[in-house]
Image (cartoon, rainbow, N blue to C red):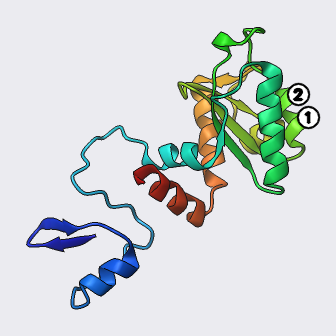
């Protein structure tokens, strides 16, 4: 981004910008995100990008189809924590989400965070759930997480992201 007299004058890739504005002062932001003219206190830029670059569960038409999408993604990304988004059981013939045991069966011993389309609940593997030391008592270990339990597991899943993954997600959100 190039700023001239307090106004954004140019947006684009670093290499092109450095060529066009070779005399400009460069301010390194250490991976921080800057978005011009973007004022909205409730935008989840990184989360939006993660949805774009991660496992897309919106096409799932049933519990089994959802599990197959997760299994395929897990096989294509060995060793990585799994992050997906978009499942919605309300239109599935089973009218239910996969349970934790089914998620564990397809992801193995990897952390997996799979948010529902509305992001107000999520499926999480046992490995990820166990990384959260203070999950509220009384949650159903087999069911999707909601409320405080969901927020804590989502926060833990976020700590598993590398700086490079966060940067890639932010670029994807703004692309």
The x and y percentages for residue 93 are 76, 8
Residues at circles 1 and 2 in contact by the CB criterion of under 8 Å: yes
**Observer-nearest residue: 147 or 23?**
23
Q: Secondary structure at mark 2?
A: helix
Image coordinates for residue 112, horizontal then vertical, percent: 75, 41
In terms of depth relative to the viewer, which is nearer, 103 or 88? 88
Q: Residue at x 76, y 18 (%)?
A: 62
Question: Which quarter of the image is occupied by the C terminus?
Answer: bottom left
Q: Quadrant of residue 26?
A: bottom left
In the figure, is residue 44 to the left or right of 70? left
Labels in figure, total: 2
Q: Is residue 27 visible?
A: no
| Cα gap from disc 1 to disc 2, whole angstroms | 6 Å
Eyeballing the image, is 80 above or below 98? below
Is 80 situated above or below 14? Answer: above
In percent of the image, x 55 and y 45: which residue is there? Answer: 52
Name the residue carrying label 1: 105
Q: Left or right: 88 with respect to 80?
A: left
Which of the 4 image quadrants contains residue 27? bottom left
Find residue 6 and name its label. Answer: none
Q: Which mark is residue 101?
A: 2
| Residue drawn at (62%, 53%) of the image | 159
In the rendered structure, the answer to whether residue 144 lies left or right of residue 76 reads left
Residue 139 picture quarter: top right
Mark 1 lies on a secondary structure that is: helix
């Amino acid at each position: 981004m190039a700023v001239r007299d307090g106004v954004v004058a140019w947006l684009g890739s670093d290499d092109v910008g450095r060529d066009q504005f070779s005399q400009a002062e460069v301010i390194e932001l250490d991976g921080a995100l800057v978005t011009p003219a973007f004022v909205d206190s409730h935008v989840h830029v990184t989360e939006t990008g993660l949805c774009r670059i991660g496992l897309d569960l919106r096409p799932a038409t049933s519990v089994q189809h959802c599990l197959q999408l997760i299994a395929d993604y897990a096989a294509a990304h060995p060793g990585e924590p799994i992050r997906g988004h978009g499942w919605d059981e309300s239109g599935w013939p089973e009218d239910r989400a996969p349970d934790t045991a089914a998620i564990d069966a397809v992801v193995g011993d990897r952390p997996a965070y799979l948010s529902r389309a509305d992001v107000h609940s999520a499926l999480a593997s046992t490995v990820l759930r166990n990384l959260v030391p203070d999950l509220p008592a009384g949650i159903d270990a087999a069911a999707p997480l909601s409320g405080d339990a969901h927020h804590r597991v989502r926060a833990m899943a976020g700590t598993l992201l590398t700086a490079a993954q966060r940067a890639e997600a932010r670029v994807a959100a703004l692309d």
